[in-house]
């Protein structure tokens, strides 16, 4: 009988010990847990990271209507780092996703976004790439940011002039850390027009590398509090400014170049890469670590094959 009691006492002590150990392990796991968005923010803020960030232009528009919620969800599912979406204001002051000033190209309606109320826009259908109506509707910025919350970084385009309204929605959806705004303006002008938001969201300047004052603009931005990234338009791949990309990354600023169309990247564009993915080698060879693309699936496959993306 004593042996049996001793046996049960040992078993009970062992179970209690295991439970305490498991609780300690769970606590440790929670403390060390890094959320998807924290991981992405770390990559974005570390210009020396060897991985390349992929930005999907107007979301995954080849497989869903551009700027649609489904196109954004596709990007989240495939592991894209950032989605670029466009913002316009309706007649009654709502913010919706739409690239053009008009709705003619992407919906079964016509006219300017600013002449339509939100309720009226919501009756329309978004078109696919062949201009066939789909079940998808024009999303609001609030709907888009709610979908992306804690999942993917967001670049708001066409938003500079209406950013005060955008910012209210960003705050209300709790997506302030995820959003990047950009503009093709010099530093002093950005400080005058956008200054109140510079310590609240990430701002990224756009520099046309072929412009005569490109070097001056870059130097001004790098003098004090360098931006997290600079987006460069590289019209020719022989431009001397390309040689400074590595230096910028060493100083803490990432280099963003668009793969969309040949005038953005000296002819090293997505459509050529669709025929031969080694076209993307040019970006890696020139120390470009953020690439905006119209072919996110193709670019991700290429980068993962080179161990430059998870």
Image (spheres, grey):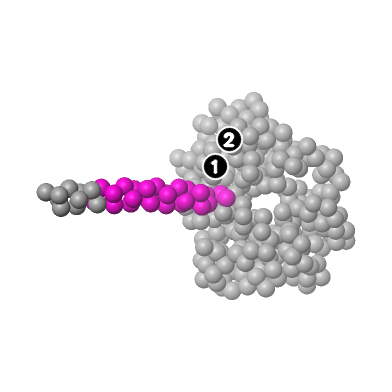
Q: Are marks 1 and 2 in contact (CB under 8 Å)?
A: yes
Of residue 2 and residue 127, the one placed in the foreground of this image is 2
Report x, y in % for residue 176. Answer: 64, 40
Quadrant in which residue 45 is drawn:
bottom right
Residue depicted at 66% across the width and 59% down the height: 46
Mark yes or no: residue 259 visible.
no
Residue depicted at 60% across the width and 64% down the height: 51
**Residue bearing the label numbered 1:** 149
Of residue 249 and residue 124, the one placed in the foreground of this image is 249
Residue depicted at 85% across the width and 55% down the height: 223
**Residue bearing the label numbered 2:** 173
Q: Main secondary structure of the magenta part?
A: helix
Quadrant in which residue 190 is drawn:
top right
> What range of the chain is rendered magenta?
11-38
Question: Which label's residue is closer to the chain start, 1 or 2?
Answer: 1
* CA distance for labels 1 and 2: 8 Å
């Amino acid at each position: 009988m004593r042996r049996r009691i001793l046996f049960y006492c040992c078993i009970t002590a062992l179970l209690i010990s295991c439970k305490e150990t498991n609780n300690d392990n769970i606590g440790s796991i929670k403390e060390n847990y890094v959320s998807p968005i924290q991981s992405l923010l770390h990559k974005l803020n570390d210009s020396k990271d060897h991985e390349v960030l992929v930005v999907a232009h107007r979301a995954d528009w080849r497989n869903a209507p551009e700027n649609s919620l489904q196109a954004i969800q596709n990007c989240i599912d495939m592991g894209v780092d950032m989605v670029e979406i466009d913002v316009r204001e309706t007649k009654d002051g709502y913010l919706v996703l739409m690239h053009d000033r008009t709705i003619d190209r992407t919906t079964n309606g016509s006219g300017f976004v600013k002449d339509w109320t939100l309720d009226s826009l919501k009756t329309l259908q978004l078109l696919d790439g062949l201009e066939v109506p789909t079940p998808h509707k024009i999303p609001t910025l609030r709907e888009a940011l709610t979908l992306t919350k804690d999942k993917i970084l967001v670049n708001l385009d066409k938003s500079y002039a209406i950013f005060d309204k955008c910012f209210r929605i960003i705050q209300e959806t709790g997506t302030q850390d995820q959003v990047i705004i950009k503009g093709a303006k010099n530093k002093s002008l950005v400080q005058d027009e956008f200054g109140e938001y510079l310590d609240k969201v990430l701002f990224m300047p756009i520099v046309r590398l072929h412009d005569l004052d490109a070097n001056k603009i870059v130097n001004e931005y790098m003098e004090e509090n360098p931006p997290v990234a600079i987006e460069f338009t590289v019209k020719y791949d022989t431009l001397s400014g390309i040689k400074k990309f590595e230096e910028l990354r060493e100083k803490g600023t990432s280099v963003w170049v668009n793969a969309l169309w040949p005038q953005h990247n000296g002819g090293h564009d997505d459509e050529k890469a669709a025929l031969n993915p080694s076209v993307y080698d040019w970006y890696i060879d020139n120390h470009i670590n953020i690439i905006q693309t119209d072919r996110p699936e193709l670019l991700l496959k290429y980068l993962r094959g080179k161990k430059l993306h998870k």
